[in-house]
Image (cartoon, helix red, strand yellow):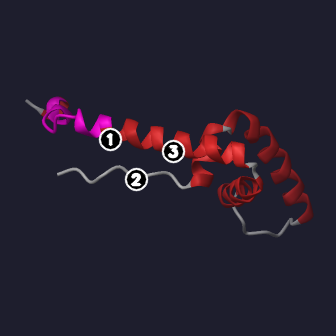
Amino acid sequence: MVPPPRTLHPWQAFSKLYSDDLNPKVTEEWKKFKVENPDTTTTFFAYRNSLMQKWYAEASPVIKAKVESFRQEEKEDSRETIEGNDDTSCMTGYQK
């Protein structure tokens, strides 16, 4: 039995939906952060996630509505993929 698909957190969907626009901004912010905090133990991944959470919280209601719609579409798409997946099809490469 396959578990139900997990829905992305709003900030994760925001990140995925707007990655082309936000990735250069994240890179610039990271460079500034590293200069200002040379001894930090924060990873790029953790810093990026914190920025995404912050920027999502500051986003307009219109953006948040788009993100919510995207989240639901992603959930439905993953559900359709799981439901359409024949459990035996994943074993094809292992059959002798």
* Residue stretch in magenta: 80-92
Q: Is residue 77 left or right of residue 89?
A: right
Instruction: Look at the picture and state if 34 lies above or below 61.
Output: below
In the image, 58 versus 78, the foreground residue is 58
Instruction: State the separation of the CA atoms marked 3 and 1.
Output: 12 Å
The residue under the point 16% across, 34% down is 86
Dividing the picture into quadrants, the one containing residue 47 is bottom right
Q: Is residue 55 left or right of residue 35?
A: left
Q: Position of residue 70 (x, y in %)?
A: 54, 39
Residue behind mark 1: 79
Label 2: how many Cα within 10 Å (few below 14, some 14–19, many 20+): few
> Which numbered disc, 2 or 1, marks the residue that appears first in the sequence?
2
Q: Position of residue 73 (x, y in %)?
A: 46, 38
**Is 26 one of the magenta-colored residues?**
no
Residue behind mark 3: 71
**Is 81 one of the magenta-colored residues?**
yes
The numbered mark at residue 6 is: 2
